[in-house]
Image (cartoon, rainbow, N blue to C red):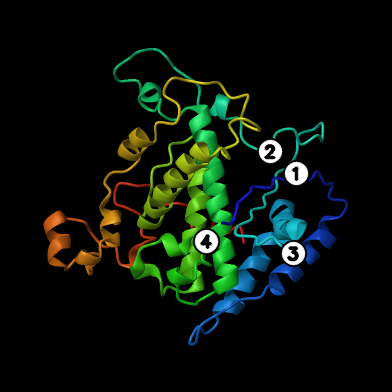
Amino acid sequence: MRRRFKVTAEVLVEVVGEAPLERSAVRSVVGSVFVVGGGSGGTVVRFRRDGSEGVRGDPVAALEAVVDPVAIVDCEGVEVVGARCWAVEADGRGDGSRVWPDFAALFPECGCGGGDCVRCAAGMLTPRTVAVLWSAAGMLADLAYGDVLEFGDGPVDPAGGLWSVFGEFPRITWRQDAVWRRRAARSFDDLAADLAAGECPRPRCAAEEMALHLILRYAESAVDDGWSGLDTRFAGLPERGDDLDWALLSDVLFTDHDILELFDPGRDGIEDPDDDHNRRLDIGDYRPHAWFTTFDHAQPRDPRRPFRR
């Protein structure tokens, strides 16, 4: 039986030349190896072009492009099943002591007891809960981008066990191309950004619904399996009685759970708004091309926001 471990490494660096760093990042993006299926057209070219543009003028994105976390465990007897890397600008002391948002300040406890208090109603988003959700979202984003880099346009093969994230998506998405998957990977980052801004991570499109379902699942597993960070980097966050209430979060963060119907083989075709089951349940359009369409009740995200990779 294989045993799985989590290795954490933290490196503090000084950027002594942004231009050379940018050139290194562009070379790293352009030199990335992609696996693409037939008929993919300009997917690889477009992916490399967008990735190169994403690191220009952004030292954080450039660092994330050049750092290879897999290299620290490149040895016999170890098979890397997932890796993540992120960079932030350290504070003025330069000690890098905090590499995550101040969740205690972003999600303070109100305690007024008012029945119509918005902050009290959002009390399930406690600092410890948010820290785990934010960490899980970042990890899943890294893994999803990793799937795109490794498999490109190739169809998902869940039997192979090599896919980190997209093998857990509904079957109707398994033949989407790298561009679609890259947009789906950004959905994890979008929800993480909501949390980092002190906002409730309510999904704004189908892709974000899928992302949030996985974030909640991974966050709960992280706590149960002891790799959530609550005993280490997040140990200083205040504890509350309503911490880590995953069932409550699942109820209040979603308008509905219609997207989970896509996992039922007995309801193939339900993603189509013309399907009888779809119309009876009033599900709406869950065909893959509609996954990034903003819900009617939601505020659209900035279409110019960058991709991490």
Element class at badge 1: loop
Residue 10, label in figure = 1
Asked if disc 1 and disc 2 are in contact, CB closer than 8 Å, the reply is yes
The type of residue carrying mark 1 is Glu
How far apart, in angstroms, are the residues tagged by discs 3 and 1? Answer: 23 Å
Amino acid type for the residue under numbered disc 4 = Ser
What whole-number distance in Å separates the C-alpha atoms at marks 4 and 1? 23 Å
Residue lying at the far bottom in this picture: please name it.
38
**Of pointers 4 and 3, the one earlier in the residue sequence:** 3
Proximity of marks 4 and 1: CB atoms separated by less than 8 Å = no
Q: CA distance from mark 1 to mark 2?
A: 10 Å
Which secondary structure lies at badge 2?
Answer: loop
Dot 1 or dot 2: first in sequence order is: 1
The quadrant holding residue 120 is top left
Pair 4/1: label in front: 4
User: Taking 187 as reference, is 9 above or below it?
Assistant: above
Q: Which residue is mark 4?
A: 164
Q: CA distance from mark 4 to mark 3?
A: 21 Å
Where does residue 201 sit, x and y in percent of width and height? Answer: 43, 41
- Left or right? Give the position of 236 relative to 216: right
Q: Are marks 4 and 3 in contact (CB under 8 Å)?
A: no
Q: Name the residue tied to disc 2.
A: 99
Mark 3 in CB contact with mark 1 (< 8 angstroms):
no
Q: Nearer the viewer, residue 39 or 80?
A: 80
* CA–CA distance in space, label 3 to label 2: 31 Å
**Nearest to N terminus: mark 3 or mark 2:** 3
In the rendered image, residue 283, in percent from the top left (x then y), is placed at 21, 56
Mark 3 surroundings: few (<14), some (14-19) or many (≥20) residues within 10 A = few
* Residue 306 visible, this angle: no
**Circles 2 and 4: CB atoms closer than 8 Å:** no
First reached walking from the N terminus: tag 2 or tag 4: 2
Q: Position of residue 165 (x, y in %)?
A: 49, 60
